[in-house]
Image (tube, rainbow, N blue to C red):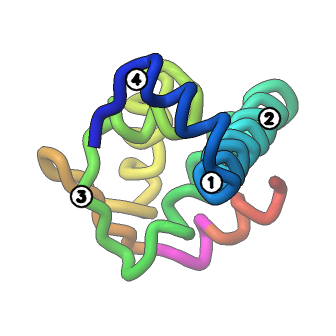
Amino acid sequence: MRLSHSAFNQRLAESDVFRRFVFGSFGTRLASLMLLFEEVTFERVDVRLASYLVQAGDGELNATHQMIATELGSAREVISRHLKEFERRGWLEMQRGRIRVRNRHLLEQLARRL
């Protein structure tokens, strides 16, 4: 659904449910951005990347390097460099648009530094 600026303001003024939804969503997004800012500022990229890969689920991730970089607040080139190093160590295997975790235990060890 798309609302005009005036319709949005009107609904915001008239509906408690809509207002709670908007401000709740805004608060959640702001908290996520603050957490990302803290991680980007204080945590190493390789540690954040390892944590991201461990949390990705079943050991296979369909994502481009750019998608991961955006999620982690880093540059694609930096993420690519770390992924290649992880692959060289045998921790994962990369194919176009797909990453398969091969040694979850070692990634978890690195991720624990977060």
Please provide percent x and percent y for residue 10. Answer: 54, 30
Name the residue tied to disc 3: 62
Secondary structure beneath dot 1 equals helix
- Graded by Cα atoms within 10 Å as few (under 14), some (14 to 19) or many (20 or more), the crowding at tag 4 reads some
Mark 2 sits on what residue?
34
* Residue that label 1 marks: 21
Amino acid type, residue under disc 1 in the picture: Phe
Q: Earlier in the sequence, mark 3 or mark 1?
A: 1
Left or right: 40 with respect to 71? right
Q: Which is more foreground, mark 4 or mark 1?
A: 1
Dot 2 surroundings within 10 Å: few (below 14), some, or many (20 or more)?
few
**Quarter containing the C terminus:** bottom right
Residue 100 sits above or below residue 97 on the image: below
Q: CA distance from mark 2 to mark 4?
A: 21 Å
**How many residues crowd mark 1 within 10 Å: few (<14), some (14–19), many (20+)?**
few
Left or right: 40 in relation to 82? right
SS assignment at label 3: loop
Residue 101 falls in which quadrant of the image?
A: bottom left
The span picked out in magenta is 103-107
Task: Name which residue lies at 27% across and 43% down.
Answer: 1
